Image (cartoon, grey):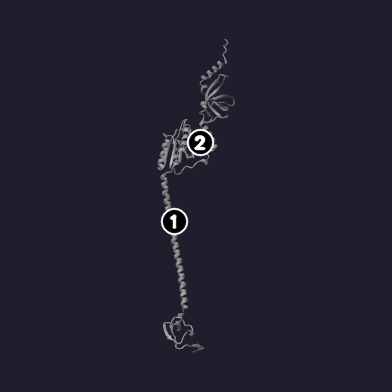
Amino acid sequence: MALKPITVSQLNDYISRVLGTDPLLGAVVVKGEIFSLKYHSSGHVYFSIMDTNSKVSCFLPREYAQTLQFPLSDGQEVVLTGAINVYKKNGTYSLYVRHIEVEGEGDLAVAFEQMKAKLQKEGLFDPAHKKPIPQFPKKIGVITSKTGAAVRDILKILQTRNHMVDVVIFPVLVQGDAAAADIAGMIDYVDAHFDDIDTLIVGRGGGSADDLWAFNEEIVARSIYRCSIPVISAVGHEIDFTISDFVADKRAETPTAAAQLAVPDTRELAERLKEMKDYLYVQLSNKLMYHRLYVDNLVSDMRQQLEHKIQERRHSIENLKIVLEENNPLKILDSGYAVMTDDDGQLMRSISQLQQGGHYRVRLKDGYARVLAEEIGSEIHGQDEV
């Protein structure tokens, strides 16, 4: 019995129902290489995947395309999850894609590396742009969840290490679709309105890669980069790295570590000051002792030099005394000579100075006599001459 013919549309409807009710084809997972990639203005994405022998057309609706954390590109090895749909108008089928992963890597890992490469190329990680963290801050700002363990840990460490610093908490969402915009907006707000904040801690406690993803978003990275306040990134645990860590002025392994980096320990400072004081005291004491010994040596040396000079002068005076005594004109009196002066004390050196009948003073070695010149004469060749 001959079969009744059906229309092309009926055939395509039938194939569509068969494919649509097949449990495997309704949730198929396929891997292949992307080619003929096209981003439509509607937001839909059209492409094909292929292996060495075959290819299949793919359709990624706008609502799924918007959730991608990384851009697609030709030649990319991907794993697609979706369902087989028949396009009834031309009788072709395609894979209706609901999820995409890069082969061998998670989509978050790929998005992370792509974002990292992009921002690094733009210079957002440049060490020359990074600001130093103030050593002695007066006020710390903390951008994190108001209910998480991170804020409790940060406050505990800050209060334990430094009771002199003020802390301001700026609560934000730290995970979910709205978290990145909330964090970025708060960074911009604090930067614009709190010029008395010295250091800003931005972060959250640990979690899965998806939980931490807000700190990998471009909008957060750019807010940190343009912030004029030095930023410490404190996201997750020691093994967790986010884009925020690379952009921030300083990366802390944990929120607790961020609090330790942000403020000095006042107890340690007090101990260091005491050590410095003790050291200075010892140094000053040693220097004082050295200078005292130096001055004592100078005084002793000066005293010795003065005594030597005095002794030299004494010897010189003694020598001069001897010379004077040896040359004392009165010493000749010891030999029987006498000295005659007039009443005015003028020395009589010649008889021409004498006057007959005049009175004169004659000094001998043991006294003097007042004499009258009764006769004046000169001795020439042993004879007196009147």
Residue at the spot x=42%, y=53% of the render? 282
| Res 254 quadrant in image | top left
Q: Which residue is mark 1?
A: 287
Residue at the spot x=44%, y=63% of the render? 299
Nearer-N-terminus badge (2/1) = 2
| Res 159 quadrant in image | top left
| Dot 2 crowding, Cα within 10 Å, few <14, some 14–19, many 20+ | some
Q: Position of residue 243 (x, y in %)?
A: 50, 36
Mark 2 vs mark 1, foreground winner is 2
**In the depicted structure, whether residue 167 falls above or below residue 332:** above
Quadrant of the image for the N terminus?
top right
- Of residues 110 and 31, the one nearer the viewer is 110
Q: Residue furthest right?
A: 53
**Residue type for callout 2:** Arg
Q: How far is disc 2 from disc 1 in space, using C-alphas? A: 56 Å
Q: Which residue is mark 2?
A: 222
Mark 2 and mark 1 residues within 8 Å of each other at the beta carbon? no
- Of residues 271 and 338, the one nearer the viewer is 338
**Residue type for callout 1:** Lys
